Amino acid sequence: MPVKRMEKTPMPVQGAGSRARNFKEVNEGYSTFHATFEAERCLRCQDPVCVGGCPVQIPIPDFIHAVANEDMAGAARILRSANPLPAICGRVCPQETQCEAECSLGGRFNPVAIGHLERYVADWERSQPISVTPSITRDEQIAVIGAGPSGLVCAGELARRGYAVTVFEALHAPGGVLRYGIPEFRLPKAILDWEIDVLKAAGVEIQCNVIIGKTLKLDDLFTVHGFSAVFIGTGAGLPQFLGIPGESLNGVYSANEFLTRINLMRAYDFPDADTPVHVGKRVAVIGAGNTAMDAVRTSLRMGAEEAMIVYRRSENEMSARVEEYHHAREEGVTFHWLTNPLEVLDDGGGWAGGLRCQRMELGAPDASGRARPVAIPGSEFVLAVDNVVLAIGTTPNPLLTRTTAGLVTNKRGCLVADEQTGLTSKALVFAGGDAVTGAATVILAAGAGKRAAQAIHEALAARAEPFRQRASLRFDHRLP
Ligand code: FAD
């Protein structure tokens, strides 16, 4: 076995001091030299365990081998065969718990930087002209509800199979969380726009400002508008609150509202943009997932002098991507681990002025399998804050299920759907992504959209078959 370099080729990044005050992408991307140098670290194992760690089973050693040979077009083809959103997933997937966690080099050395290589290849592909053209060969039209990653991938896969697809999106711009949640400094919107342009070039129609369940009813998509099947990719956009006193004070936001105001509604440009956001000197973000990291780092970029994470468990239970956590630390975010918020205090004028907290310690594991935080008596203290941002989770918005008869949900409000096909309790209605799993990841949503597209195709083909047989029988009758 050749001797391998132990360390990953580092990703060039903007310096922490300057980037904490701007919205430009933090990671600057590999050059061709970096990419081929890193690709040569791959062992091309006979049993490529990294593939098993990828939720959509990208043939990882094959695309990395193509990079090592500087065959970027080949690498792009291999990547796209499994993952329709490589430029996005190369940036936001939690590789350290997926493919890179399985890499054979990982035991003794650093795993191959699979995510950085995926991003490199996808960015190379984006520098080439879009070569897709529409090819509608089927009679059936499909409706997709929601233009997040699950809906966009499902639409793209159906268009590739020759269907006319219309995506209905509630907001004024497509992309879902990729547009309104994940900030520019992690996922530049130009990348999302390019993916959407590819879909449009393939013939997918996107209608924004249409709320299914309000503007149009789901059943009407079949009976009035003539769609043959529907995919629901409406995500889990309803924020959860703590239910503590003071949550309705001014200056308290859900992370979804905070990030939407800034990312989608351009509050950073107020008053040139219509939507304001109030960011004071001290911002406390409750939670320690990707959403919390995005909110706390965004608050720094919006001018906060002190940006802090408040989390009732410890660093070990944090669910954010490791890279985001490191970047947040470098940018000066402070972390209050084992700290439970009890009350948002009024500054006397109806605005948040403090956060009363108590210290916690970890006890036996709870239902989630993580150590249960237990309050330490007499440990209360107050953090001085001007804003509190709640990033403690989201659930699916119930609007669609409340206005559609026959759509079964579970006790968390998620749609019940077959794991493989995405088929819901309603005939020819499929679903996937966060609307089914609850808040999860981009790659899982994309994978669900892809599987549902295949299932829709098979369901429509199966429905058409008896008709074709009947038609050919009728035709045969007329034969002399
Ligand atoms: P969404 O992306 O939520 O898209 C759903 C779309 O449906 C939205 O555009 C919504 O407006 C639309 N919609 C809803 N209801 C209707 C309706 N009735 N009619 C029409 N349209 C409707 N995952 C990662 O893998 N890595 C990360 O780093 C990461 N960071 C994240 C950061 C933040 C701030 C957040 C909030 C999430 C993050 N996630 C991350 C999770 C990831 O973004 C989601 O799992 C993923 O976007 C889910 O995709 P989806 O298509 O199911 O739903």
Image (cartoon, helix red, strand yellow):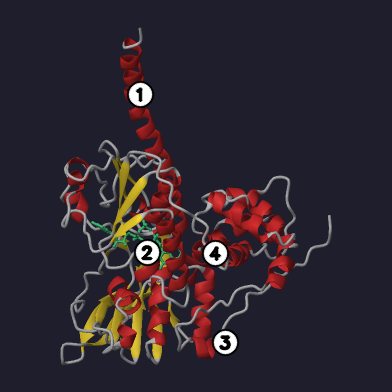
**Residue 414 screen position, x and y as percent:** 29, 50
Q: Within 8 Å of ligand 1, the CB of disc 2? A: yes
Labels 4 and 3 touching (C-beta < 8 A): no
Per the image, the residue denoted by label 1 is: 468
Single out the mark in the foreground, 4 or 3.
4
Q: Secondary structure at mark 1?
A: helix
Distance, label 2 to label 4, CA atoms, is 22 Å
Q: Nearer the viewer, residue 415 or 162?
A: 162
Q: Is residue 60 left or right of residue 254?
A: right
Q: Give the amino acid at mark 1.
A: Arg
Q: Residues within 10 Å of mark 4 (few under 14, many from 20)?
A: few
Q: Within 8 Å of ligand 1, the CB of disc 4? A: no
Q: Residues within 10 Å of mark 1 (few under 14, many from 20)?
A: few
Which mark sits nearer the N-terminus, 1 or 2? 2
Q: Secondary structure at mark 2?
A: loop
Which mark sits nearer the N-terminus, 4 or 3? 3
User: As drawn, which residue projects farthest toward the right?
Assistant: 2
Would you identify the image quadrant in which residue 171 lies? bottom left
**Residue 434 screen position, x and y as percent:** 35, 55
Distance, label 1 to label 4, CA atoms, is 40 Å
Per the image, the residue denoted by label 4 is: 129
User: As drawn, which residue projects farthest toward the top?
Assistant: 480
What mark, if any, has residue 175 been given in the picture? 2
Distance, label 4 to label 3, CA atoms, is 32 Å
The residue at 34%/82% (across/down) is: 284
Single out the mark in the foreground, 1 or 2.
1
